[in-house]
């Protein structure tokens, strides 16, 4: 069983919350030194942002908007409080999205994630994340060295050469996507190669379904997951308790209704929004485009930070209906204009050769006049006609979907 990385992991949740929001104003003040953040956040007093309610009043920054913003103001859209030359490494991820790596020790905050997976001083790690242009390889490399491991900077692919490395160096740990770990296992078995030295793994960057988890465990490898993005590194990580993913330190997590910046009710599925208290690379309410939900209580492993369910799908649910794009923000606007509605879901379907829309609304108001008024709002906001169907409060699925496209593919 892995020990705790430091005392911060087990501190009282209220102490952590107070610490985060005590430090938040300084992070916002630093961000406002960058012209991009100044444009985005507008005229605000950082000293007043000391609570979740105050934070929720700030505008969302969408990851999906970064490529256009960076193209208009290269290389970072004006969102970094420093020149590109001030950073240690400079990356570009698919999008393209340009990201810098600050100079310092374990700047991606990956050490505690690896420690939770049982990585320790003296281990040799086969790191198969890419070192080419993207930050993944470097982030896991720095985290492994932060906990005292030696790292084989293997990168992805070239399976036969990787097997040679494993038999020569006898690494005990693997970092990379789960799919490539399976390829190594299958290839080694087919060719009679020995990779039995690998007994633990930290995987990310791809789906890790229960079937694959079971298969890898069957080969004597204890594999743990982390949810990470290129903009800030690991957001949450799995522990030996296997009871969700524990939120990393120095991050304020919000779960919001897709298409809005409004926090959802506890336990409800919504979009992940992160605020990272890093003065070198500040992120204020970055909506990453993925769905999850917060789990109640704390982990049985003793870590007291929030837990999430893990990746539950994409928040970008834009649908093209009769040649017009309909977005979650528009559904949110309809709900906003009618206080009788608590939640809504727009279902897009086909009737013969025609697209049809039905807005399902959780409400106790079911009069014809009310439904007609909502229908008029749907048309005014989306420029498309749609039926309105009332449903009982709490009856819509808790899956984060605001727009459900049921049309057949192809």
Image: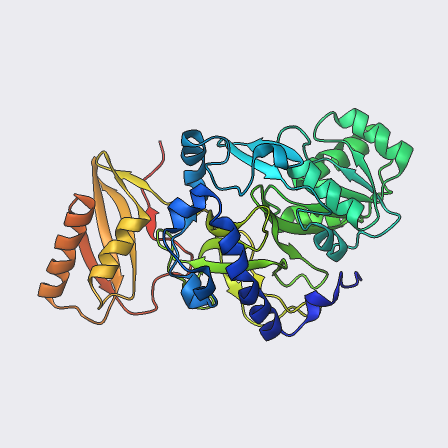
Q: How is the image coloured?
A: rainbow
Where's residue 183, x and y in %? 71, 34
Q: Nearer the viewer, residue 351 or 199?
A: 199
Relative placement, left or right, of 393 versus 147 is: left
Q: Give the residue drawn at x 68%, y 41%.
A: 103
Residue 36 is situated, as x and y percent measured from the top left of the image, at 43, 42
Q: Nearer the viewer, residue 331 or 6?
A: 6
Give the residue displayed 43% in from the left and 29% down from the top: 71
Residue 327, quarter of the rendered image? top left
- Position of 374 with respect to 393 (left or right) is left
Q: Quadrant of the C terminus?
A: top left
Q: Position of residue 276 (x, y in %)?
A: 55, 53
Is residue 274 visible in the rendered structure shown here? no
Q: Position of residue 72 (x, y in %)?
A: 40, 31
Write the residue at 56% across / 55% down. Answer: 310
Q: Quadrant of the N terminus?
A: bottom right
Q: Nearer the viewer, residue 350 or 51?
A: 51
In the picture, residue 363 is in which quadrant? bottom left
Give the residue displayed 33% in from the left and 45% down from the top. Answer: 406
Does residue 27 appear in this view? yes
**Which residue is outermost to the left?**
369
How many numbered marks, from 0 up? Answer: 0
Q: Describe residue 248's horizontal placement relative to residue 63 as left or right.
A: right
Direction from residue 105 to residue 266 in the image, left or right? left
Q: Is residue 296 above or below residue 84?
A: below
């Amino acid at each position: 069983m892995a020990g705790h990385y430091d005392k911060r992991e087990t501190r009282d949740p209220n102490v952590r919350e107070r610490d985060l929001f005590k430090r938040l104003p300084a992070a916002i003040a630093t961000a406002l030194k960058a012209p991009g953040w100044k444009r985005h956040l507008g005229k605000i007093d950082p000293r007043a942002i000391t609570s979740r309610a105050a934070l929720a009043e700030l505008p969302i920054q969408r990851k999906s908007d970064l490529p256009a913003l960076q193209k208009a103001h290269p290389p970072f859209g004006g969102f970094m409080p420093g020149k590109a030359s001030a950073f240690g490494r400079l990356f570009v991820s698919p999008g393209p999205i340009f990201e810098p790596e600050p100079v310092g020790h374990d700047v991606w905050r990956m050490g505690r994630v690896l420690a939770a997976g049982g990585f320790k001083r003296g281990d040799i790690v086969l790191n198969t994340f890419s070192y080419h242009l993207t930050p993944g390889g470097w982030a896991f490399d720095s985290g492994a060295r932060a906990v005292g491991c030696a790292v084989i900077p293997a990168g992805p692919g070239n399976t036969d050469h990787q097997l040679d490395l494993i038999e020569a160096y006898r690494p005990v740990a693997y970092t990379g996507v789960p799919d490539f770990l399976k390829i190594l296992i299958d290839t080694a078995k087919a060719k009679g190669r020995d990779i039995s030295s690998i007994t633990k793994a930290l995987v990310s960057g791809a789906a890790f379904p229960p079937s694959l988890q079971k298969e890898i465990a069957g080969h004597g490898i204890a594999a743990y997951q982390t949810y990470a993005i290129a903009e800030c590194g690991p957001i949450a990580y799995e522990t030996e308790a296997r009871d969700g993913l524990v939120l990393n330190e120095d991050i304020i997590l919000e779960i919001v209704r897709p298409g809005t910046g409004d926090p959802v009710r506890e336990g409800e599925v919504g979009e992940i929004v992160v605020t990272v208290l890093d003065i070198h690379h500040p992120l204020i309410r970055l909506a990453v485009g993925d769905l999850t939900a917060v789990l109640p209580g704390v982990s049985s492993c003793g870590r007291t930070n929030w837990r999430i369910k893990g990746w539950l799908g994409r928040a970008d649910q834009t649908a093209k209906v009769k040649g017009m794009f309909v977005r979650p923000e528009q559904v949110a606007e309809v709900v906003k204009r009618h206080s009788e509605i608590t939640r809504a879901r727009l279902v897009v379907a086909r009737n013969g050769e025609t697209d049809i829309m039905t807005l399902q609304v959780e409400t106790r108001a079911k009069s014809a006049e009310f439904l007609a008024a909502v229908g008029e709002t749907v048309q005014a906001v989306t420029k498309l006609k749609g039926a309105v169907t009332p449903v009982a409060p709490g009856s819509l699925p808790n899956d984060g979907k605001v727009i459900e496209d049921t049309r057949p593919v192809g």
